[in-house]
Amino acid sequence: MAKGQKLKGRIRSVQNTRKITRTMELVSTSKLKRAQDRVIAARPYAEALREVLADLVTPELAERFPLLRRPAPPANGGPTRAAVVLLTSNRGLAGAFNSNLIKEARRRIEALESAGYTVDLHGVGKKGIGFFRYLGRKFALERMDIGDKPTAEHAAEIAEPLIEAYSTGALGSVDLVHARFVSALTTPPVTVRILPVETAAGLPGGGAAGQETDRPARDYILAPNAEAILEQLLPLYVRNAVYRGLVETAAAEHGARRTAMKNATDNAGDILEVLKRTYNRQRQAGITQEIAEIVGGAAALQG
Protein backbone atom coordinates (compact mmCIF):
# COMPACT_ATOMS: atom_id res chain seq x y z
CA MET A 1 0.00 0.00 0.00
CA ALA A 2 2.90 2.30 0.79
CA LYS A 3 4.22 1.79 -2.74
CA GLY A 4 0.80 2.64 -4.16
CA GLN A 5 0.69 5.86 -2.17
CA LYS A 6 4.14 6.77 -3.44
CA LEU A 7 3.01 6.22 -7.04
CA LYS A 8 -0.07 8.39 -6.48
CA GLY A 9 2.18 11.12 -5.09
CA ARG A 10 4.40 10.95 -8.18
CA ILE A 11 1.35 11.08 -10.46
CA ARG A 12 0.10 14.23 -8.72
CA SER A 13 3.57 15.78 -8.93
CA VAL A 14 3.88 15.12 -12.68
CA GLN A 15 0.34 16.42 -13.27
CA ASN A 16 1.19 19.67 -11.49
CA THR A 17 4.41 20.00 -13.46
CA ARG A 18 2.54 19.43 -16.71
CA LYS A 19 0.09 22.20 -15.82
CA ILE A 20 3.00 24.60 -15.28
CA THR A 21 4.81 23.70 -18.51
CA ARG A 22 1.57 23.90 -20.48
CA THR A 23 0.86 27.35 -19.06
CA MET A 24 4.38 28.53 -19.89
CA GLU A 25 3.98 27.19 -23.43
CA LEU A 26 0.78 29.20 -23.89
CA VAL A 27 2.35 32.36 -22.45
CA SER A 28 5.38 32.06 -24.76
CA THR A 29 3.08 31.45 -27.73
CA SER A 30 1.20 34.65 -26.92
CA LYS A 31 4.39 36.70 -26.49
CA LEU A 32 5.99 35.18 -29.58
CA LYS A 33 3.42 36.73 -31.93
CA ARG A 34 4.11 40.27 -30.70
CA ALA A 35 7.89 39.71 -30.71
CA GLN A 36 7.70 38.27 -34.23
CA ASP A 37 5.81 41.35 -35.40
CA ARG A 38 8.65 43.55 -34.10
CA VAL A 39 11.20 41.46 -36.02
CA ILE A 40 9.21 41.65 -39.24
CA ALA A 41 8.86 45.42 -38.84
CA ALA A 42 12.60 45.91 -38.19
CA ARG A 43 13.97 43.91 -41.12
CA PRO A 44 12.82 46.05 -44.11
CA TYR A 45 14.10 49.24 -42.46
CA ALA A 46 17.51 47.69 -41.81
CA GLU A 47 17.76 46.39 -45.36
CA ALA A 48 16.72 49.74 -46.85
CA LEU A 49 19.28 51.53 -44.69
CA ARG A 50 22.00 49.17 -45.89
CA GLU A 51 21.03 49.76 -49.53
CA VAL A 52 21.14 53.53 -49.11
CA LEU A 53 24.59 53.33 -47.53
CA ALA A 54 25.79 51.03 -50.29
CA ASP A 55 24.70 53.58 -52.90
CA LEU A 56 26.17 56.57 -51.07
CA VAL A 57 29.56 55.27 -49.97
CA THR A 58 32.49 55.69 -52.34
CA PRO A 59 36.15 54.81 -51.69
CA GLU A 60 36.92 58.53 -51.31
CA LEU A 61 34.17 59.05 -48.73
CA ALA A 62 35.06 55.85 -46.89
CA GLU A 63 38.44 57.30 -45.95
CA ARG A 64 36.81 60.30 -44.27
CA PHE A 65 34.58 58.36 -41.86
CA PRO A 66 36.13 56.40 -38.98
CA LEU A 67 33.12 54.06 -38.80
CA LEU A 68 33.88 52.82 -42.32
CA ARG A 69 37.65 52.45 -41.94
CA ARG A 70 39.19 49.05 -41.29
CA PRO A 71 42.06 49.49 -38.82
CA ALA A 72 45.20 47.41 -39.10
CA PRO A 73 45.46 44.27 -36.95
CA PRO A 74 47.39 44.47 -33.66
CA ALA A 75 50.42 42.78 -35.22
CA ASN A 76 50.70 45.68 -37.68
CA GLY A 77 50.31 48.43 -35.12
CA GLY A 78 46.51 48.67 -35.09
CA PRO A 79 44.25 48.88 -32.00
CA THR A 80 44.79 46.10 -29.49
CA ARG A 81 41.23 46.06 -28.12
CA ALA A 82 38.07 44.65 -29.64
CA ALA A 83 34.52 44.46 -28.28
CA VAL A 84 32.02 41.60 -28.25
CA VAL A 85 28.39 42.33 -27.34
CA LEU A 86 26.57 39.19 -26.13
CA LEU A 87 22.76 39.16 -26.08
CA THR A 88 21.06 36.47 -23.97
CA SER A 89 17.83 36.23 -21.99
CA ASN A 90 17.14 37.02 -18.35
CA ARG A 91 15.28 33.74 -17.80
CA GLY A 92 15.97 30.09 -18.44
CA LEU A 93 13.69 27.15 -19.28
CA ALA A 94 14.36 27.74 -22.98
CA GLY A 95 16.29 24.60 -23.84
CA ALA A 96 19.77 25.18 -25.27
CA PHE A 97 18.96 28.76 -26.32
CA ASN A 98 21.31 30.57 -23.93
CA SER A 99 24.03 27.93 -23.94
CA ASN A 100 24.27 28.11 -27.74
CA LEU A 101 24.67 31.90 -27.59
CA ILE A 102 27.35 31.57 -24.91
CA LYS A 103 29.23 28.99 -27.02
CA GLU A 104 29.13 31.33 -30.00
CA ALA A 105 30.45 34.21 -27.88
CA ARG A 106 33.27 32.07 -26.48
CA ARG A 107 34.22 30.97 -29.99
CA ARG A 108 34.38 34.58 -31.17
CA ILE A 109 36.33 35.73 -28.12
CA GLU A 110 38.89 32.96 -28.61
CA ALA A 111 39.29 33.90 -32.29
CA LEU A 112 39.87 37.57 -31.45
CA GLU A 113 42.31 36.76 -28.66
CA SER A 114 44.26 34.43 -30.94
CA ALA A 115 44.53 37.37 -33.37
CA GLY A 116 46.17 39.46 -30.64
CA TYR A 117 43.20 41.47 -29.39
CA THR A 118 42.20 42.15 -25.80
CA VAL A 119 38.44 41.61 -25.77
CA ASP A 120 36.02 43.92 -23.94
CA LEU A 121 32.89 41.90 -23.23
CA HIS A 122 29.52 43.69 -23.13
CA GLY A 123 26.72 41.59 -21.67
CA VAL A 124 22.98 42.04 -22.13
CA GLY A 125 20.90 39.43 -20.31
CA LYS A 126 21.26 37.72 -16.97
CA LYS A 127 22.16 34.27 -18.29
CA GLY A 128 25.20 35.30 -20.30
CA ILE A 129 26.42 37.68 -17.60
CA GLY A 130 26.05 35.00 -14.92
CA PHE A 131 28.04 32.46 -16.93
CA PHE A 132 31.02 34.70 -17.63
CA ARG A 133 30.98 36.01 -14.07
CA TYR A 134 31.35 32.40 -12.95
CA LEU A 135 34.43 32.14 -15.18
CA GLY A 136 35.82 35.28 -13.53
CA ARG A 137 35.60 37.47 -16.62
CA LYS A 138 34.92 41.17 -16.14
CA PHE A 139 32.39 43.06 -18.22
CA ALA A 140 32.76 46.46 -19.81
CA LEU A 141 28.95 46.73 -19.74
CA GLU A 142 26.24 44.80 -17.90
CA ARG A 143 22.56 45.26 -18.77
CA MET A 144 19.85 43.12 -17.20
CA ASP A 145 17.01 45.64 -17.38
CA ILE A 146 16.05 45.40 -21.06
CA GLY A 147 13.95 42.22 -20.98
CA ASP A 148 11.94 40.97 -23.94
CA LYS A 149 10.61 44.38 -25.07
CA PRO A 150 13.69 46.26 -26.32
CA THR A 151 13.39 49.78 -27.65
CA ALA A 152 15.47 52.02 -29.89
CA GLU A 153 16.60 53.88 -26.75
CA HIS A 154 18.02 50.66 -25.32
CA ALA A 155 19.93 50.06 -28.54
CA ALA A 156 21.31 53.62 -28.53
CA GLU A 157 22.52 53.27 -24.94
CA ILE A 158 24.47 50.15 -25.90
CA ALA A 159 25.77 51.43 -29.23
CA GLU A 160 26.86 55.01 -28.44
CA PRO A 161 29.88 54.16 -26.22
CA LEU A 162 31.03 51.62 -28.82
CA ILE A 163 30.69 54.14 -31.66
CA GLU A 164 32.71 56.70 -29.72
CA ALA A 165 35.43 54.20 -28.79
CA TYR A 166 35.74 52.96 -32.37
CA SER A 167 35.80 56.49 -33.78
CA THR A 168 38.71 57.42 -31.52
CA GLY A 169 40.67 54.31 -32.51
CA ALA A 170 40.39 52.60 -29.12
CA LEU A 171 38.65 49.56 -30.65
CA GLY A 172 39.64 47.55 -33.68
CA SER A 173 36.25 45.89 -34.19
CA VAL A 174 32.85 45.40 -32.58
CA ASP A 175 30.95 42.10 -32.93
CA LEU A 176 27.36 41.43 -31.90
CA VAL A 177 26.43 37.88 -30.85
CA HIS A 178 22.69 37.32 -30.94
CA ALA A 179 20.04 34.78 -31.96
CA ARG A 180 18.69 35.01 -35.48
CA PHE A 181 14.95 34.39 -35.61
CA VAL A 182 14.22 32.13 -38.59
CA SER A 183 11.13 30.44 -37.12
CA ALA A 184 9.86 29.33 -33.74
CA LEU A 185 11.81 26.09 -34.22
CA THR A 186 14.98 27.58 -35.73
CA THR A 187 16.89 30.22 -33.76
CA PRO A 188 20.61 29.81 -34.53
CA PRO A 189 23.23 31.99 -32.82
CA VAL A 190 25.07 34.35 -35.16
CA THR A 191 27.97 36.79 -34.93
CA VAL A 192 27.49 40.08 -36.79
CA ARG A 193 30.31 42.59 -37.32
CA ILE A 194 28.72 45.99 -36.64
CA LEU A 195 31.95 48.04 -36.66
CA PRO A 196 33.47 48.79 -39.07
CA VAL A 197 30.17 49.34 -40.85
CA GLU A 198 29.57 46.79 -43.60
CA THR A 199 27.76 48.33 -46.54
CA ALA A 200 28.20 46.41 -49.80
CA ALA A 201 30.67 44.29 -51.67
CA GLY A 202 33.75 46.13 -52.77
CA LEU A 203 33.47 48.74 -50.00
CA PRO A 204 35.09 48.72 -46.58
CA GLY A 205 33.37 46.04 -44.56
CA GLY A 206 32.02 44.60 -47.81
CA GLY A 207 29.72 41.66 -48.50
CA ALA A 208 30.29 38.15 -47.27
CA ALA A 209 31.61 36.78 -50.53
CA GLY A 210 33.33 39.99 -51.64
CA GLN A 211 31.52 39.95 -54.98
CA GLU A 212 29.79 42.74 -56.82
CA THR A 213 26.03 42.84 -56.38
CA ASP A 214 23.69 42.87 -59.38
CA ARG A 215 21.31 45.34 -57.73
CA PRO A 216 20.95 48.42 -59.94
CA ALA A 217 22.21 51.67 -58.43
CA ARG A 218 19.55 54.22 -57.62
CA ASP A 219 19.69 57.80 -58.82
CA TYR A 220 19.48 59.95 -55.66
CA ILE A 221 19.06 63.69 -55.33
CA LEU A 222 21.31 64.49 -52.39
CA ALA A 223 20.78 67.49 -50.15
CA PRO A 224 22.98 68.92 -48.85
CA ASN A 225 25.55 66.28 -49.93
CA ALA A 226 26.53 62.63 -49.47
CA GLU A 227 29.07 63.42 -46.76
CA ALA A 228 26.53 65.22 -44.55
CA ILE A 229 24.01 62.42 -45.02
CA LEU A 230 26.53 59.70 -44.20
CA GLU A 231 27.51 61.55 -41.03
CA GLN A 232 23.95 61.00 -39.79
CA LEU A 233 23.26 57.60 -41.32
CA LEU A 234 26.35 55.70 -40.14
CA PRO A 235 25.67 55.99 -36.37
CA LEU A 236 22.00 55.32 -37.10
CA TYR A 237 22.96 52.15 -38.95
CA VAL A 238 24.98 50.87 -35.99
CA ARG A 239 22.18 51.63 -33.52
CA ASN A 240 19.70 49.90 -35.81
CA ALA A 241 21.93 46.81 -36.05
CA VAL A 242 21.96 46.57 -32.25
CA TYR A 243 18.18 47.10 -32.10
CA ARG A 244 17.60 44.39 -34.68
CA GLY A 245 19.77 42.01 -32.67
CA LEU A 246 17.77 42.78 -29.54
CA VAL A 247 14.35 42.18 -31.13
CA GLU A 248 15.48 39.02 -32.94
CA THR A 249 16.94 37.60 -29.72
CA ALA A 250 13.73 38.39 -27.83
CA ALA A 251 11.60 36.64 -30.46
CA ALA A 252 14.00 33.70 -30.61
CA GLU A 253 13.84 33.35 -26.82
CA HIS A 254 10.04 33.00 -26.87
CA GLY A 255 10.24 30.54 -29.75
CA ALA A 256 12.85 28.42 -27.95
CA ARG A 257 10.90 28.51 -24.68
CA ARG A 258 7.67 27.53 -26.40
CA THR A 259 9.39 24.57 -28.03
CA ALA A 260 11.07 23.52 -24.77
CA MET A 261 7.84 23.76 -22.78
CA LYS A 262 5.89 21.84 -25.42
CA ASN A 263 8.46 19.05 -25.29
CA ALA A 264 8.31 19.08 -21.48
CA THR A 265 4.49 18.90 -21.55
CA ASP A 266 4.56 16.00 -24.00
CA ASN A 267 7.18 14.17 -21.92
CA ALA A 268 5.12 14.69 -18.76
CA GLY A 269 2.14 13.12 -20.54
CA ASP A 270 4.23 10.08 -21.48
CA ILE A 271 5.48 9.72 -17.90
CA LEU A 272 1.91 9.98 -16.59
CA GLU A 273 0.81 7.13 -18.86
CA VAL A 274 3.60 4.90 -17.52
CA LEU A 275 2.91 5.82 -13.89
CA LYS A 276 -0.85 5.29 -14.21
CA ARG A 277 -0.33 1.95 -15.92
CA THR A 278 2.08 0.87 -13.20
CA TYR A 279 -0.30 2.04 -10.46
CA ASN A 280 -3.29 0.21 -12.01
CA ARG A 281 -1.31 -2.99 -12.42
CA GLN A 282 -0.15 -2.84 -8.82
CA ARG A 283 -3.70 -2.12 -7.63
CA GLN A 284 -5.07 -5.01 -9.72
CA ALA A 285 -2.41 -7.33 -8.34
CA GLY A 286 -3.36 -6.31 -4.79
CA ILE A 287 -7.05 -6.95 -5.44
CA THR A 288 -6.26 -10.34 -6.98
CA GLN A 289 -4.12 -11.26 -3.99
CA GLU A 290 -6.88 -10.26 -1.55
CA ILE A 291 -9.45 -12.36 -3.46
CA ALA A 292 -7.09 -15.34 -3.44
CA GLU A 293 -6.59 -14.99 0.31
CA ILE A 294 -10.36 -14.83 0.90
CA VAL A 295 -10.98 -17.90 -1.28
CA GLY A 296 -8.16 -19.74 0.44
CA GLY A 297 -9.48 -18.85 3.88
CA ALA A 298 -13.02 -19.98 3.00
CA ALA A 299 -11.68 -23.27 1.62
CA ALA A 300 -9.71 -23.82 4.82
CA LEU A 301 -12.82 -23.28 6.96
CA GLN A 302 -14.81 -25.76 4.91
CA GLY A 303 -12.17 -28.33 4.89
Image (cartoon, grey):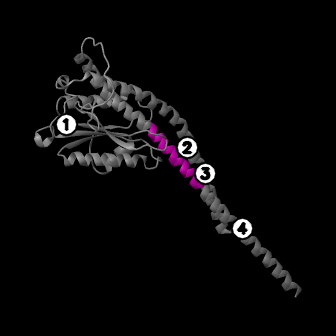
Q: Sequence order check: which comes first, mark 4 or mark 3?
A: 3
In this figure, what is the number of numbered marks? 4
Q: Amino acid at mark 1?
A: Gly
Graded by Cα atoms within 10 Å as few (under 14), some (14 to 19) or many (20 or more), the crowding at tag 3 reads few
Residue 172 tag number: 1
Q: Main secondary structure of the magenta part?
A: helix
Q: Sequence order check: which comes first, mark 2 or mark 3?
A: 3
Q: Nearer the viewer, mark 2 or mark 3?
A: 2
Write down the residue under mark 3: 16
Q: Sequence order check: which comes first, mark 4 or mark 1?
A: 1
Q: Is residue 109 above or below residue 301?
A: above
Report x, y in % for residue 26.
57, 41
Left-right relation of 283 to 166: right
Q: Sequence order check: which comes first, mark 2 or mark 4?
A: 2
Task: Identify the magenta region.
Answer: 251-268
Q: Sequence order check: which comes first, mark 1 or mark 3?
A: 3
Alpha carbon separation for disc pair 4 and 1? 71 Å
In the figure, residue 234 lies in which quadrant? top left
Whether residue 270 is visible, yes or no, is yes
Write down the residue under mark 2: 25
Left-right relation of 24 to 276: left
In the figure, residue 53 lies in which quadrant? top left
The foreground one among 199 and 156 is 199
Write down the residue under mark 4: 283
Residue for point 79% across, 78% down: 292
Left-right relation of 40 to 101: right
- Mark 4–mark 1 contact, CB under 8 Å? no
